[in-house]
Image: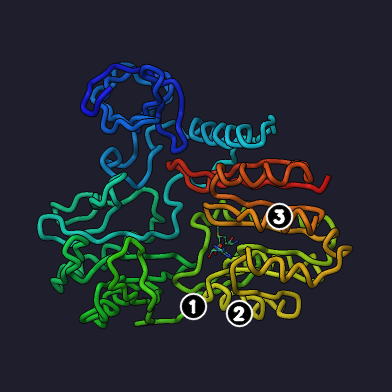
Amino acid sequence: MNKGDILQVEIVGTGMNGEGVAKVDGKVVFVPMTLEGEQVKVQITEDKKAFATAKVIKMLQPSPLRVAPLCPIYFGCGGCEMQHIDYAHQLAIKTNRVADCIRKQCRQDIPVLPTIASPSKWGYRNKVQLPITLVDGKIAVGYFRNGTHKVVPLGKVEDGTLGDCPLHDRAMQEVIDVFLEWANRNDLSVYDETSHRGLLRHFCVRKVGNSFAIVVVVNGNKLPNHNSLIDDFVAHGLSFSLYLSINTDRTNVIYGKCIKTLYGRDTLFDEILGVKVGVSPLSFMQINDGVRDMIYSKVGEIISKSSHSVVFDLFSGVGVMSNIFAKYADKVVGIEIVPDAVRNADTLAKLNGNQDKITNVCGDVTVELPKQIAKYSADKLSDGIVVVDPPRKGCSPEVIDCLLQARPKQIIYVSCNPATLARDMAMLLPKYCVDFVQPYDMFPMTGHVETLVKLTRV
Ligand SMILES: C[S@@+](CC[C@H](N)C(=O)[O-])C[C@H]1O[C@@H](n2cnc3c(N)ncnc32)[C@H](O)[C@@H]1O
């Protein structure tokens, strides 16, 4: 097999991101946008030692589970990868993927509950971070085409109107449209990563309650004429705060180190499951409100079953869960690495009257967890609960070791990556048994899945 070869293949499985998998002479070939059971004519786009990738040239026999995507630019855009799959089947793929990862890492068949659907399968994203580009001389925003740095603009720019991304919260489109109209009217330059010239890099919006946190990322130190952008947002009746992120580095990292408030508040406020919440523009928040609430409620329900001397909320973000747990524990210790998020978490504890119960520690969980655990007696720890909600890379081996030493009664693991979840579970399993594994569809139409696991000390 060589790059450029044209072959006829049958799709025999599903890869980690929902892509189809074929086998050619024993080699795995990943074919995006295909489904198990389909017959396709493909062209090899990459031939590596361990696997190859291919693109569809002609669909010969489509699967009955194939559906027409809602988005007109779906096949050219890299923003999502499952719109062509019937939604119930998307859920089944995600359940199987979690089960596969656990089976491979833990070497046992642990039952995985069926993935719970998102309350909204469209319009669920409360946050977007869009690279800014030029299309025929017009400023546009979009998503990077898979595996490239080429921006596919959202919708149709040619006729002057912008289309939409069906995954975005509907209200966000107006914010995007106002910004693009303003940027084009002001004739601003657009950042080019090759020459490292041009001003506008990214346009980011997060919906917090009924307000928007809007961040313009620039390769420079100011946003010219930003007062007229504020006027435009105001004229559209939007409730918002506008921030400038200065990023003059040659980097793929979106935000710069410096962020300035140009209009509105440094923090936006909302309420989640009865907890008052304040969010800075760069603090982590789950992107699907409906599924976030389901997961937080479930974790809260588990913790509410008994009272605890201490609950550890590891990777605590702005501390929403810490405040939910505070009702059922003498003490909650949150550990989070982003200083802004920890500041938000302190404000939240005060806003919710939990400042005496919650301690927010700023630092790396790997470093801070042993120090915090050392403050509690073995008795108190053994009656305690630890909630971990790490980023995609999961927990470090040191964190898992620390948990194995402290032996809390229960560990609740919230994961956005089944591969690292399964790796970490395998290390915990000799000392813990699995009560349930529950995937949630936090990210419909994409290959991602969120999973909640409850473990009890053996
Ligand atoms: C998946 S988010 C979970 C946040 C929070 N539990 C929530 O539900 O909103 C992971 C969080 O871990 C933080 N984080 C990443 N690496 C960390 C580390 N090594 N130590 C502490 N926090 C970390 C991130 O800043 C982020 O807020």
**Within 10 Å of the Cα at label 2, are there few (<14), some (14-19), or many (20+) other Cα atoms?**
many
Residue 259 or 49: which is nearer the viewer? 49
Amino acid carrying label 2: it is Thr
Q: Mark 3 or 1, which is nearer the eye?
A: 3
Any atom of ligand 1 within 8 Å of the CB at mark 2?
A: no
Q: In which quarter of the image is residue 274?
A: bottom right
The answer to whether 292 appears left or right of 81 in the picture is right
Q: Kindly identify which residue carries mark 1.
A: 267
Q: Kindly identify which residue carries mark 3.
A: 401
Q: Kindly identify which residue carries mark 2.
A: 347
Q: Quick check: marks 2 and 3 in contact, CB under 8 Å?
A: no
In the figure, 64 relative to 219: above or below? above
Q: Which of marks 2 and 1 is nearer the N terminus?
A: 1
Q: Which residue sits at x=36%, y=19%?
A: 24
Label 2, secondary structure: give it.
Answer: helix
- State the separation of the CA atoms marked 3 and 1: 36 Å
Q: Which of marks 2 and 3 is nearer the N terminus?
A: 2
- State the separation of the CA atoms marked 2 and 3: 32 Å
Residue 457 or 136: which is nearer the viewer? 457
**Within 10 Å of the Cα at label 3, are there few (<14), some (14-19), or many (20+) other Cα atoms?**
some
Amino acid carrying label 1: it is Thr
Q: In which quarter of the image is residue 352?
A: bottom right
